[in-house]
Image (cartoon, grey):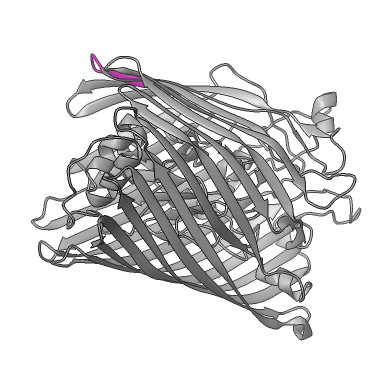
Amino acid sequence: MTERMRIWQKAGWLAWLLAAAWGQEQPKPELPKVHTSITINASPVEPSIDHRNREVFEQTLFSRDDQVFHQFNAGINAGQHEGGGKSIEIRRFGFNLDHGGVNGGMKILVDNMQQNQSTQGHGQGYLGSLKSLTPELVQEANLINGPFSAEYGDFSGLGVVHIRLRESLPDQFTIRMQGGSFNTERGFFAFSPDIKNVDSFFAYEGSHTGGPFVKPLGYRRDNLTANITKRLSKLRSVGFKFNGGLNRYTSSGQIPLDLVTSGAMDRFGSLDAGEGGKIRTGTAAMYYRQEMKNGAIWKLDGFFTRSLFDLYSNFTFFLNDPVNGDAIQQHDSRLVQGANAQYLLPHKTGASYSYLTAGGNFHANQINVGLYPRIGRTPIGVTTAANANVINGAGYAQENLSFFAGKLLASIGIRYDTFRFDVRDRVVPEQSAVEPSARWQPKASLAWTPARRIPVTLHANYGRGISSMDARSILTRRDGPKVATTDFYETGVSSNWRRFSLAADLFWIDRSNEMVYVADDGSLEFLGPSRAYGVETKASVQLTRHVGVSGGLTKVMNAFYRGTFPREYVDRAPHFTGNGALTVAGWKGWSGSARVRAINSYGLDPGDGAPRAAGHTVFDMSLVRRLHRNADFLFSIDNFTNRRYCET
């Protein structure tokens, strides 16, 4: 949290509001100095925001996208299976979000571009596009615990992670070569030219690993990323970004645990030689920023994405088809267009200083999606096939106010989202349909510091978030809900005193519906309504100038379906999540960390607590040694206690 305060202090007016909430004395803000980045990245006044900057990403040997989320110490259980080729799976606050988009969802953005893919071939809100994210290019990552910011809509019910990439690199040339266990190799190469009034870089990342599996994983990833930001004047700038990625692999897939337990099958074995996937994606984006003389700022951006996705899976082997087997190919081909506009205005309302954030979002997907039975990687029929056109438009406004010299901070916001689901069924054309939907989402926050001499702040947050339905599921459930809502209540206390920081919160989450993915036909079905409540704590201590300890615990007291008797419980997610880290920075040329993440065992059936997935406690460590001003040596061990566990 001390690091967080230092960074927010550089952000001007918004930082002054947030710092006041934590009981820190700050000078009167200079209103024109607001956001220095060309990307849109506003945040509400709520102490539960978490921040990680580029130093974390520079000093870690990332090899999986789930490692990004382990850095937050924020109750996020992000798992990876099939060796890294598929999207991460996320569980949070007692809910299973699958690949990020159901049961409230967690919204992930990179430079204001939504990564959650709606109506996706393998799952609603699928986050496979994160495979094209190169960790060395991350400038900072912000986490908002719930749907408390009006800026974010679909998939934001259980939190938002906004990742912002660099606009240039500190060195003109950067080379990182990496090697490790299981035939793992990785290279990162970047060129950042020194051009007057221009920030730019061109970077390539290539990696490969065989994995620990009996059938070699053959995971290959190639990413190309570029940025050019031109400062047209002191108050105006324009930027262009490009990202392209290739991701291909074979995999062991999901295998029967009973065969592994009995010793009949190796836990790194496989049953289907055709499993794996191939993904290609490319995104081009443009950003524009204009500062006004009154301190206001206009931000505009737009992007275009083209992606091709084929995943070869097998969940039930020969259960349904004893002759050909149950192997499937999930296909997704899509065009995505998006645009965002935002207006930021610091102003004075009576005796209070205020900060207005207003804007709008547009997101459109044209999708060719299908599910096909297969033998090997050859399709032998058609289960489902559809063309879906999903359009989401939204407008929002949020006002942050400061009273009594910053002792009381208030935020109130409103957001309105509209959806249009146009689905053309290519197997049963008469089932085609066009369905609209819309939702209001109110937001409110309070933060009160009773006395400056006592650095304790009381805070309360409320927000409604939404998560949209897979468009194909509308065909079979015309009268069902098309958008689920999440009402998130949070109250707690926080303190930042010298080298010690602490935040403790009680949370209460009401969901209108739970969405369960049905892999056999690629659809979603609604269950619900549900409720979860519990407690979350975070703390950090700077023991010395070079050594710090931080951690967080999330305990879900209960998660259940309302109105059920006997009571049925929300399943497939842990009720305890813990994270911690011991970090050494800048000690005689050494830096490093030892990290731990843990979850408890959890139920797999809503009505019967007997079938359970095992929990685990995993330790990772890393070391960095500065050899020369132009050279570093990095070393890391994942799971250095060799804990045996099943990822999903």
Residue 42 x %, y %: 35, 55
Farthest residue, direction bottom: 430
Farthest residue, direction left: 196
| Residues drawn in magenta | 587-592
Q: With 520 as the anchor, is 422 left or right in this view?
A: left
Quick one: 596 or 575, which is closer to the camera? 575
Determine the residue positioned at 68% across, 60% down. Answer: 330
Q: With 4 as the anchor, is 316 left or right in this view?
A: right
Quick one: 213 or 445, which is closer to the camera? 445
Query: In which quadrant is the N terminus drawn?
Result: top left
Determine the residue positioned at 35% across, 24% down. Answer: 634
Can I make out residue 525 in this image? yes
Chief secondary structure of the magenta span? strand
Rendered position, 314 above or below 78: below
Can I make out residue 100 in this image? no
Residue 566 x %, y %: 90, 44
Quick one: 163 or 189, which is closer to the camera? 163
Rendered position, 258 above or below 437: above
Quick one: 33 or 319, which is closer to the camera? 33
Rendered position, 634 above or below 144: above
